[in-house]
Structure formats: structure tokens, C-alpha cells
Image (tube, rainbow, N blue to C red):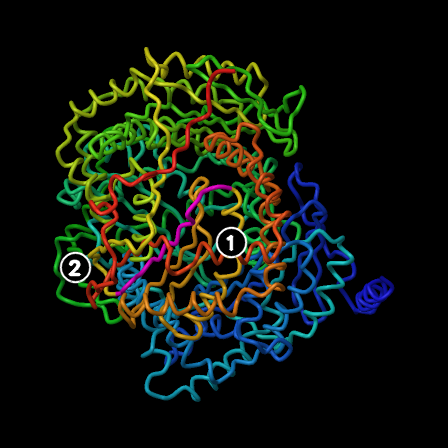
Amino acid sequence: MMESRLRWLILWLLVVLSACGERPVENVVLPQTDSREVRYLRLDNDLQVVLISDPSADKAAAALDINVGSRHDPKDRQGLAHFLEHMLFLGTEKYPDAGEYQSFIASRGGSHNAYTSFEHTNYFFDIGADHLDEALDRFAQFFVAPLFNAEFVGREVNAVNSEYQARIQNDFRRALDVFKELANPEHPFSKFTVGNLSTLLGGRGEDALRQDLLDFYQKHYSANRMGLVVIGRENLDELQAMVVERFSEIENHKVRDKPIKEALVEDTPLRFELKPRKEMRSLSVSFVLPDVRAQYHKKPLSYLGHLLGHEGEGSLLYVLKKNGWAEGLRAGAGIEYQGGSLFNVEVQLTPAGMAAVDTVTDMVFEAIALVQAEGVAQWRYQELTDIARLQFDFRTRPSEIHEASQLAHNLHYHSPADLIRGDYSMTDFDPELIQSLVDEMKPEKAIIAITRPEMEGDQTSELYGVPYSVLPPSEAEVERWQRRAGVAGLVLPKPNPFIADDLSIKTGDASETPKAVLRTGRVGVWHMLDKRFALPKGNLNVLIRSPGASKDATRQAAAELWVRMVRDELNAFAYSAQLAGLDYSLSARWDGIALELRGFNDKQGMLLDSLASRLANPEWDEVRFLRVKMEYIRDLENQRHADPYRYLSSELGQKLRRFRFSSELRLEAARGLGMREVKAYSKEVMSATQLYIMAHGNYSESDARQFARVAADFLLGGRLPDAQPEQIRRIPEGDFGDSYALEHGDAALLWYLQAPDPGHRARVVLGIAGQMVGPAFFNQLRTQDQLGYVVYGGAYPVREVPALYFVVQSPVTDTADLQKRFRAFLKDWQENGLDKKSFERNRQALRVKLLEQPRNLWEAGDQFWRDLMDGYTNFDSREQLVDVLDSMGYETWKRELSAILAEESRRSLWLQAGGERGEKVLGTQSLDGPQWIGRKRQFFLYEHPPLTD
């Protein structure tokens, strides 16, 4: 105890003796609902630091953002900044073990990651709040004394190349590849961000690459271009002591960037077409504009994006949808960099829209011309100012790790006072600035990209192999775009009726968990006035239970089409609500239709009334139906182009749950459905329903009952639905599996290992194991074996059915080899990885996770709703798990884990995508085959909570 006090005394003296930083330079402005203490300081080495003290935090977090990215890559080492991000984690002088940082974070309930962009590299982690001091000691060393060991250079080049290969069919990256190829080669944005074997090694060897890496780090990783954010439960003085001691050692090379003067695109207008992998069509019209990030109080590009990207009645999207030409639209700033920005208007087109792409292009320029002529108005700007002020004043706090990462980035652009407020600040209306920017959006300066699967292209991009063609607009086309002919029905947005007026906090008795206030057998209502967050917001969840809704693939497809019809019909109306901070979701579930409202509670009743009435009585419009059906079919077809590991993970969920049907079955069903069948299906579903309703947040009990009356008026059927429990598949002993032919070259394998019996005890056993096995699996199969970029493993509970699972997507080997390595890893881990010290550490980490308190109203609401849907009407699922966890000793855990993982009685499910190496024989049998149909307990059953007292 005396040593601990002495340590803190020494650390405090270090702060006091530091030449600067012991006092805040400027107060950071916080939302009125945020009671945390915040301090900004600048260390002697010019490192900017923000400290956030939150005594109630269960998790601590830190992030360091460096104003360095792919922009700074040497032309002959493209991808170097990203490669450095990989190498930095692999040991420091103080902590030389390459996997020590990752293991330390994971075994104490945390996570970590990093990203590299054009001008930034951002490193971040979170961890159990008690371990921040030790975590910072490790984290700081990456920026003080990294090793960059030569033995890891070749390995991490392979990891970067695997990341490149894993995303080589990603259509966003493919489109970016074409744009970079057409951009000015003297502009740094034309460089390849990710890197691969060719761009990093280039035949010059690993030693030369390592030397260039060291030179890059020494030149660019300078304290004066770094921003650090630390969030912990310690007080500000203690946090400051931690930081000053460790991060003052970072060297300051006093380097700064100058704005980029080269043109992003040399000759405009530029128009090109490219061929996507997925079935998708789009038109993008972009303009190079000045960099206005320093004008964050004015946000001129946000204002223009609001007008051009609006989705309400009379908007560009609304008019395009009425013609059957568009499915979606977005507008706003894309890339922003020192010296410029790129503003985009992108339209997701239907096949009919692509056939009329010239007319759609005309309409985009008409919309821009309308904004140029009439759009810059004080009242419109003030409306956005009011919305932004409400969003800041009643900010929903993100998780610590995401907040630290974002604020570290903001340190480069916002004043200390505006570190948080800057993202919301929109107070200075500057009509001249806005007008000057929109006036720059001239047809002769446009960059037009057309994406369509029908084109073949006369060129192929070098890095991603994308077919494309450059199609310069004719003078006649440019002249046509410059003329304003008008578009029937196209108007600027009307005033927003959903901006909250009543921001009062409800009075009454608050509770710690929701209480049932009504259970009639047909309707159940749970209510909770939550004063922990003191926000004029709330979550309203409604389940319209009708289990027949998805008892076969045809009904599931019909449910999805019905819900999509309603969402599309409501989009123009509900868009204004979403802008004003009142969002909703409407989705088809296996047991019915789920509706959720989330946001300011003031106008929720108005939105609920519209949603419920439209769901019960949609406008059955044939043009809308055909467009929605086409979009749904395309989405299902495109699943074959998903990343293999994502596809296998999705299919695992379908395999384990009854009444979930594969994308292939739903696709076949959707193709045969007409509007008449979907309409009849909706009537059938609505004829027999029960309602589960939860009102959590700033609601009185009378509010909850009123919501129930509105919902019942529209959504309660004439009879009770049949009982239908959720059914989770019981995997028999043995090896079962399935194979999928996907449009991707990488092989991928997923191994699911199910416990023989469900329940809290087995969930805890595999929960601890999952904490331990994930980092070890990653270290062995990615770091050591270099099998691919995508490698992960851990616990996989479904309801009360626990399991472990392991996933690898590999560009270098096939699924048979992966299976051998999976089994060899698990065997070695069982023999050498189950030590008592690791058990105790990871048991505590799991405990921290289970007892972690919700950070905001939405997390709390999601936990309560999930508990209710899982039958925990006392809302204590996590507490029950902790009770079992606390009573479990090491020997008991090891014995029970060994029984679950015993090779002779394993319950395994193997899912593979063979890629270019093809499907391999894995020694599995079909899960749906006759060899196990009819055995006892094919499914574990879970009933809905009763709606009677």
C-alpha cells in the first residue's frame, strides 16, 4: 500500500515539474447531460492530449491519431504507412514479445484495432477500467521504442497482401481503384493505400523494406502531429500523471504538411464507366471543392448535402423513385484532405434508371441548379442549426473506444473547446461561402462515374482488375447540362415538422428494470422510466408476433417484400423524422414483424401512428412493388459475392435456427411472388397476432399504455396465433458440414463446436474458453502461420446453446489444409493453453464484460428488449451468468471443458467455401441427412414469455 502511494506521489511530481500541461489550456465544452471531467493539455514535445475522467466507467480506453497516412507513402513503396500500422504492434524494447500487447488487452476484457487512411493512422484500445495504467505503459511504447524486428517483415508483408486479396472483389475498393488510376498521378491520392507484395517489396528484398520503414517512422511519427485521448475512471490528475510519464518520451521532429496544390483530376469533365462484381448500378456526379474543414462552425458542405440528399416529398430521390429509376441517393463530402475535398451525389439506379441514365444525369444537374438559384436560405440553415444543437445538448454517448478514436482524430481539426461540440456545431450561416461552393458544381467541372454490370470496358485497372472505359462527354451534352429546363415535381425541402419541442424530463418513480403494466393474453406492455441518462429520448419496441409469418421460405420472402414495401412508402414521410433525431426500423423476423422507434420522444406518437397504419394497410402500388422486388432479388443474388467469411457466418445462423432459410431458397421463392400473393400473405399474418411492447426511456406509464392502444388499433388481429417456440438445432455427435460455391478466389472455413447440453453452466465454461482461445488462435494461424488476413475465434452462444467457433479466410491454402490446422491448434491449446493463471485472468475479464453497464439509453434498451425476447422477464440474464461464473473453480472448468471438447464426442459443424482451389473432402456428412433425422431432441426449444399474469 505504501509503495502504491509512493508511486503516485512520484508520478504527480513528474506532472508538477513538467514545463507545461499541468493546467487546461482551454475548457472542453460538454453536452449539458455529460457530467464527466475533461482536460486538454499540450506536452513539452507538442503532443496534444485530452483526458476524460469518468468514475462510473467499466471500460477505460485510449486512442492516438497521427496525421500521417497513405498520402505520405513514397511512390516506390505504396502501402508503407499501412504496413507500418501492422508492424508497430509486434513488440517494443520494453515489451519485446510480438503477441504480448494483444494478449494483455484481450485477457482483461478489452479489444484493440487500428486503421490507415489518406492522411491519418489511428490506433485505439479499450480494457477493463482497473487495467488502464498497465495498458498505457504498453501502448505508449509503440510510439517511443518499437522494434520493427526483421523476422516479422516478410510475415507482415504477407498479412498486408492477404488483406488486399481478401478485399479484391469489394466493389467500393474496385471503384476507388479506377478513380485513382484516372486521377492526376502527381496528386498523392492516386497512390495505392493498402499495399501488396509488389508495391511493398518490388523485388528489392525485406532488408531494404525494413530500412525504408524505419526511415518513414523516424521522419513522420512525430509528437507534434499526434493527438492522444485517454478515458478512465481515475481523476484528471492521476490520468495526467500516467500520460506525462509515458508519452513525453515521444520525439518531436517538428514536421508539418503543406496543403496539396496539385489538381486531383487534371481534365474535366471526366466521365467513365466501370463493371462491378455485384449486381448493382449507380451514377455518381462529383466535384473537387476547397478544403473547408476549418470552417466547421459553418459546415457548408453539410448544408449542401442536406439539400441535395434529402429524401422527402419533392426531392430528387422522390422524383426518381416515382419514375421507377432509383432505389437510393446520398450526397455530401467524400474525401477531405489538406488542399481540397470531393463532393459527391450518388444515385443507386434500377435497370430502368440505368437505361435512362442520361436523363437521370440531367436531373442531377437540375437539382444542383435549383440549389444554386433558391437553396441558400437563412431559415433552412437555422433548421439544421436547431437540430444540431439538440443532438449535441442531448448527445448519445458512444462507447469509450469509439469516442476516444473519434476525438483523437478531431484534435487535428477542432479547437480544444470544440473537441466534442465541433461535430455538431453549425452556428455561423455564411451564405456567400455556401453559394461560392455550390457555384463550383458546374457541369464542365464534373467527374461522372457510371457503374453497371452490362459493360465490358476497353481498359482494365492494374491493381483490382476492374474493366472500365473513359467516355468523354460531348460538347452538346455539356451544353444540355448547363441549361436549366426544370423537372416537374422537383422542389426544395419543406419545414421539418418532427423537430422536438417538448424536451422536459418525465416525473414519476424510476425503476431499475422494466415492469409489466399490462398483460391481457393478447397484448403485453412493459414500461420503464429511465432517469439514469436524463434524456428526452426513448426506445419503443413492438413485436407483432405471428409465427406463421416465416414457416417456409415463400412466407419469409413475402414478409420481407411486404416490409420493404412499407418502408419505401414511408420513406418520404419518415425521412424528416430521422433528420430530427427520431429514427425507426421495421423488419421481418422468424416470429413476426418487429418495429422500433428510437430518439426524441416528443413526436414519437405521430410517427407510430403512421407506421402502424401503413403496415396494416399499405398502398399496394405495382410500380413500387416491382422496384422493391427487384431490389430484394438483387440483394439475395449479391450474397454470393460477399466476403467468404461473412457468407459462412451468415449461413451458420441459418443452419442453427429453424425457420431461417438460405438465401438460395428465399431467392427462388421471391422470384415467383407477385403483389397479389404478398398482399394476401400480409392479411393472413395480421389476422392472428399478439403484441409485445416495451417503452423504455423518457416515458410515463400512461405514454406506454397510449402506445399500446395505437398499436392494438392497427396491428392486433382477430385471433391468437398458434404457439411456436424458437428452435435451435442440436448438432449430433460427429462431423457435419456444407459447402458453398462463391464468387471469390479465397478459401474459407468455419468450424462450429457445440456443447452437448444448453444452460448457464456450459455457457460460462465456453465463455471463459472463448476469451482465452481467440488471441491464441489469431496468433498461431495469422501471425505465425500467415494463413490470411481474416482469422478469429471465440465463444458463439445462441440463446442458451453455447459453442466455440473458428474462422479463417485464406488466399494461400485450401480448406482441407485449414481443417488440419484447426484441429492441430485445438489439440495443442487443450494440452498447453489451459493454465490456471490464464483461467483466472480470463474469468475476471468475462466477469467485467458481463457486468459492464450500458453506456447510453440505446444500449440499455437493447439489453432489456433482448432479455424480454429471451424469456428473462426479471431482466437478469447477465447476473445469472455471473452467479455461475463466480462459483466455478479452475479444476471444475477444465474438467467440463475437456468433456465438451473431447475428440470422440465432439459435435462439429464445418462450413467451407473452396474458392479457386475448389471444394475439398472434409469427412463430413449432411446435417439434414436421414442418418440423424428422427433422433431424439433435434432442437432445443425456447418459448416466448407469457402474456398472462
Query: In the image, residue 209 lies at what x, y percent?
Result: 43, 84
> Is residue 769 part of the magenta span, yes or no?
no
Residue 340 is situated, as x and y percent measured from the top left of the image, at 43, 60
Amino acid bearing label 1: Glu
Where 120 falls versus 511 (above or below)?
below
**Is residue 9 shown left or right of residue 361?**
right
**Residue 80, how many percent across, how many down?**
43, 75
The image quadrant that residue 475 belongs to is bottom left
Q: Are marks 2 and 1 in contact (CB under 8 Å)?
A: no
Give whichever of discs 2 and 1 has the lower sequence position. 2
Label of residue 471 in the image: 2
Determine the residue positioned at 78% across, 57% down: 237
* Camera-nearest residue between 369 and 69: 69
Q: Is residue 720 left or right of residue 768?
A: left
Judging depth in this view, the residue of 812 and 703 nearest the camera is 812
Residue at 78% of width from left, 61% of height from top? 22
The quarter of the rendered structure image containing the N terminus is bottom right
Q: Nearer the viewer, residue 851 or 456?
A: 851
Q: In the image shown, does 200 or 488 lie closer to the viewer? A: 200
Q: Amino acid at mark 2?
A: Leu
Dot 1 falls on a residue whose secondary structure is: helix
Q: Residue at x 43, y 54 (%)?
A: 804
Span colored in magenta:
746-759
Q: Give the Cα distance between marks 2 and 1.
A: 66 Å
Label 1 sits on residue: 896
The residue carrying pointer 2 sits among few (fewer than 14), some (14 to 19) or many (20 or more) residues within 10 Å by Cα, namely few
Is 150 positioned to the left or the right of 162 in the image? right
> Can residue 445 be seen by looking at this rendering?
no
Residue 748: say if magenta.
yes
